[in-house]
Amino acid sequence: MTSQTSPASRPHNPTSADYTPFAHLTAPNAPLYRQVMRVFLAAKERFAVHLRPEDVYAALGAGSRPADLEAVTQALDKLVEWGNLRADPDHARVTAVEDFYRRRFIYQLTRAGEAAEAALGTYDEVLGRRGELQAVALHDIVTQLRALLVIAAEDEPDPAKTYVALSVLTARFTDLADNARAFMGSLQRTIDLHDIEVEAFLAYKDRLIQYLERFIQDLITLGGRIALLIGELEERGSVKPLLSLAAAREAADAAFEDAERAQAVAYERWAARWSGLAEWFVSGEGRESQARLLRGRALGAIPQLLAVVRQLNERRAGRSDRSADFRTLARWFAQAPDDAARHRLWRVAFGLHSSRHLTVDADTLAERTASPEPASTQWGEARPLRISPQLRRTGSYERRGKPRKVADRGEAKRRLAEIAARQTEETRRARDRLVTGGPVRLSRLGELDPLAFQLFLRLLGDALATWRPDTTTTAATSGDGSMEIRLTALDDGSTAEVHTPDGVFRGPDHLVDIVDLTAGHGDRAAPGLVPLPIPAPREGISPRLTEDR
């Protein structure tokens, strides 16, 4: 008695270089093969191992199901041939000798087929990802970095807590970087769109600009804080011990003979992750951080979106643009009666004429009229054209005077450099003057010079921008990410006075803590920035400036 064999004449043993399980993607019946493989994946999630052809046929969608079962059977046999499925004899339905010789199989996924579908799923997911700017991930990164600071301060850091904190930190940073990259790519495609509905784009533009502005504010506020925490960990020398603990815990389950190598590989992997995190938020010498580049790219996208809106408004108002002009000109060329008309249209549209530096006078025109020169005459055989000797010598009919002397602007550049250096030094002194070294009352700030007072007003305005009626404590970072202010309301009803050369600044007394985020770190703001005026105050604090001349 001879047993039946599977449709594949030989066993399929895929190697690392065998990609035949992907052959169904380019086959003529590719959509049906993909649907069949999805049926097997869905069955695997329900813990169903084997499927019969009629089970696959019933699971297919009504709109995409073939007319008969034979087409599904043939698709199953082809997938077995490519190594995506495995066919086993179906002995469960054998009731007679004739049934044993009849061709009946049950099918199941192979490892190669399952791996191919997993790769295709990842491919579809990445292509369909629009990306997003995750402000929540920034908060999570701050939380995990603070947790690492607490763990590093312990006498014997807990390896489990270290591994969990670093794993969560790496996962959140990876999501942030990948989604930001995908979002900026999709944003550029959105900006490049042209043939879309104007109303839909305008509504989308408003939401997108609000989204960008909110993320930019969070990135400015939290980016400097993250850079500060990273610098603090590196200055304490806590990074390498923490990475070593995480690597040792990751390699704890490795075989004894491979433990040392596994730990070394794990440490290199953790070191690369930390280096990527630090370079993303902290600028180095001659290199800007990715966070700053992302902030600049997001800020640059807003005027680009507004430019697209302006183009759409001009198009709706009937104003012509270059693309519309070229399309109209192309229609005119197509409608021209002959080549002579097309040549005239070309000269009128583009203004391309013969050489204009050669002057043709009346005598030359009369001579050419009496004895015309054919257009096919070569340059070397044509009659010469008489030109002015001065034009031949100088290239111009006009007599040129003496060239202007080159002005020496070295003194002006030196003065500008001195002014820039002086402004930088004044700004640095103003920052040093405002740093409190801990919470102090507003009333104890003392007298401030004009520049320090302007910087103080700007910081106070940033804090007031986040103040709410029920707020008692708030923190804010300056727009350039160089300083941070923490403001806490007091309930004793006291009043603070800050003296300046221009008057006295009065208002309810608060606890204020001002920190210079640029001290000792590479990711610092550009020097010489002039602070902006303070915005209108919010509820909860109403300062006023009384001019006491």
Image: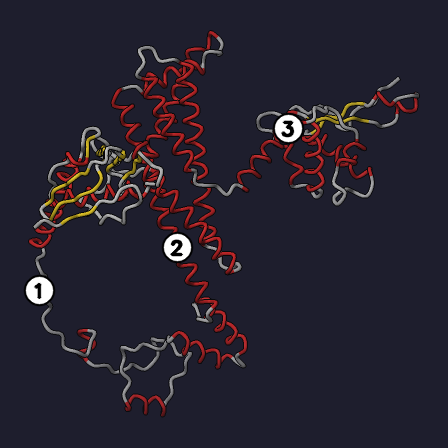
Dividing the picture into quadrants, the one containing residue 374 is: bottom left
- Which amino acid, mark 2? Gln
- Numbered circle sitting on residue 526: none
Query: Vertical placement of 150 versus 307: above or below?
Result: above
Closer to us: mark 2 or mark 1? 2
> What is the distance, in whole Å, between disc 2 and disc 3 at their CAs?
44 Å
Residue 424 x/y as whole percent: 14, 43
For residue 405, the mark is 1
From where the camera sits, is residue 284 visible?
A: no
Q: CA distance from mark 2 to mark 1?
A: 42 Å
Which of 474 and 538 lies nearest the eye of the viewer? 538
Residue occupying the point 58% across, 33% down: 119
Closer to the N terminus: mark 2 or mark 1? 2
Q: Which residue is the site of mark 2?
A: 304
Q: Position of residue 348 (x, y in %)?
A: 41, 78
Specify the quadrant of the image occupied by residue 142.
top left
Amino acid of disc 3: Glu
Q: Amino acid at mark 1?
A: Lys
Q: Evaluate if marks 1 and 3 touch, with contact meaning CB atoms under 8 Å apart.
A: no
Out of 202 and 279, give the one closest to the viewer.
202
* Left or right for 324, reference 544: right
Marks 1 and 3, how far apart at CA: 78 Å
On the picture, is 281 further left or further right than 446?
right
Q: Residues within 10 Å of mark 1 (few under 14, many from 20)?
A: few
Q: 80 left or right of 249?
A: right
Element carrying mark 3: helix
SS class, disc 2: helix
**Secondary element at tag 1:** loop
Q: Quadrant of residue 476?
A: top left
The residue that disc 3 covers is 114
